[in-house]
Image (cartoon, grey):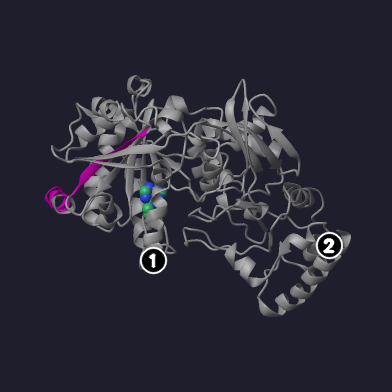
Amino acid sequence: MAQNHLMASHCMTITLILMSTLVCQSKLLTDSLYHELLSLPIAGDLHIDPESISEASVDYGLIVREIPAAVLRPSYPKDIATLVAFAYNESAIPLTISARGCGHSVRGQAMAHDGVVVDMTSLGNKTTVSWSQSLGHYVDVGGQQLWIDVLEETLKHGVAPVSWTDYLYLTVGGTLSNAGISGETFRYGPQISNVYEMDVITGTGHFLTCSPHKNPKLFYSVLGGLGQFGIITRARIALAPASKRVKWVRMIYSDFSAFMMDQERLISRHEREQDESLDYVEGQLLMRRNSDSWISFFSLSDQPRLLSLVTEHELLYCIEVAKYYDERTQSTVDKDLEMILKDLSHVPEFMFEKDVGYVDFLNRVRAEELVLREQGLWNVPHPWLNLFVPKSRITDFNTGVFQNIVLRKNITTGPVLIYPMNNDKWDDRMSAVIPDEDVFYTVGFLHSSGFGDWQEFDLQNKEVLLFCKANGIKVKQYLPHYSTEREWMQHFGPKWRIFQENKSQFDPKILLSPGQNIFNHN
Ligand code: ZME
């Protein structure tokens, strides 16, 4: 072991000498910082080669670029604690630290300018499914693990998590630091509402287990905490018996008010508490301009009349629902679904149904990814904007944003998601911020900029936010991106004081996740 560390340190020293002749290093990266890092027992897991550095300098958004001093690929969670404890206790130079999973942030949230990016994926997969009298089935997974791997492992035991994101190649730590939302959220709450316990390395280098009963302040701060309080190395997640197949339905609306009323009915308490209710409710804005992002769901024989309807109306709205089933429920699922959908007001003859495997459904965005990769349209800028819009203003939002800004600009490529969820499935003690109405919509502009020209989308995003501000529509950003403290204070509203207080307890030296730009405004 000691030998290994010496060897590794030696290698790093040589690389260092080579590096300093190759790249223009930032002023902060003094020899003394490297000298100190090298003396740590984790020296062998620190990387400063150009490839490691440049990988950690970008994210899925391809909009911001921040160059770290080094990348840590920990062998064990305690290696992260060693790094953070060094940064907190010893480092003469302020050393920021960011946990990075797959780097699926879109505004540099997992970056650390002149700091250390912890490449969590080096920790690998370890999944333990357990059962207890009080909790039923649950799974312990590393913060670095992908949800697709959690799904695969839990299915071996006939169980699975109940709340998902649309895309499963994201890490557990990453989604729990935000919220983790999808079509299941209306019924089961976001992913952060389905966590029993976590192991967290705080900004002081302490390795703590937290839950609603043990270190509760840390538990509630970390969930939706944007990486500000600690690094999640383990999460214990609620499981339920897994389904086998899915009835997957899309219904088309030309009238926004009918669309909205039906969507709200489908997520209402009355509906969701029926035993045989829907498992998933989402929705999308359909336009000719972004038809690439929605047309493939429909059969070739249905596509012409859909394209003709969208040309006639310019804007269509689509409600997408799913009902999960297994051997036990397959004989009744069609009848149950028919009951749930029977009085809806979609355009007549514009309901489309598919029957797919459970994993194929949950992993549906992966199929889109593979197509986009094939076309060279995956690793392109993603100037995404995700908003939570209070229900009371969603009609004004439709008029001002969808019917005015979006149609007039006519630049939207990629999906535009719109679906409602229930406030009572969120826990206000957690750091995640939502509007304070019983029902609010998520609206996601998942722009893809095929020509590398993201600025025009950014201008549209700014116009949308300005419209909301000017009209008093109190939207909250999901996966928020702000650059001033004033905006962050406004974002957190009444939670700001607690958020700040928790910061000073768990990361008093402001070392963690600097890429969020919340506390590091000098
Ligand atoms: C770039 C891309 C995003 C391709 C498909 N998507 C998505 N489709 C549907 N829901 C999504 C999504 N990305 C997040 N949620």
Helix, strand or loop under label 1: helix
Compare residues 492 and 308 and report the one nearer the observer: 308
The answer to which of 50 and 74 lies nearer the viewer is: 74
**Callout 2: 10 Å neighbours few (<14), some, many (20+)?**
some
In the rendered image, the residue lying farthest to the bottom is 21
- Taking depth in this image into account, of 407 and 126 the one nearest to the observer is 126
Residue at left offset 19%, top offset 26%: 343
Q: Residue at x 13, y 50 (%)?
A: 305
- Residue 174 part of the magenta-drawn span: no
Q: Is residue 201 above or below residue 132?
A: below
Bin the neighbour count of mark 1 within 10 Å (Cα to Cα): few under 14, some 14-19, many 20 and up: few
Q: Secondary structure at mark 2?
A: helix
User: What range of the chain is rendered magenta?
Assistant: 306-324
Type of the residue with mark 1: Glu
Report x, y in % for residue 173: 59, 44
Magenta-drawn stretch contains 320: yes
Position in image of residue 244 (x %, y %): 42, 37
Q: Which mark is residue 374?
A: 1
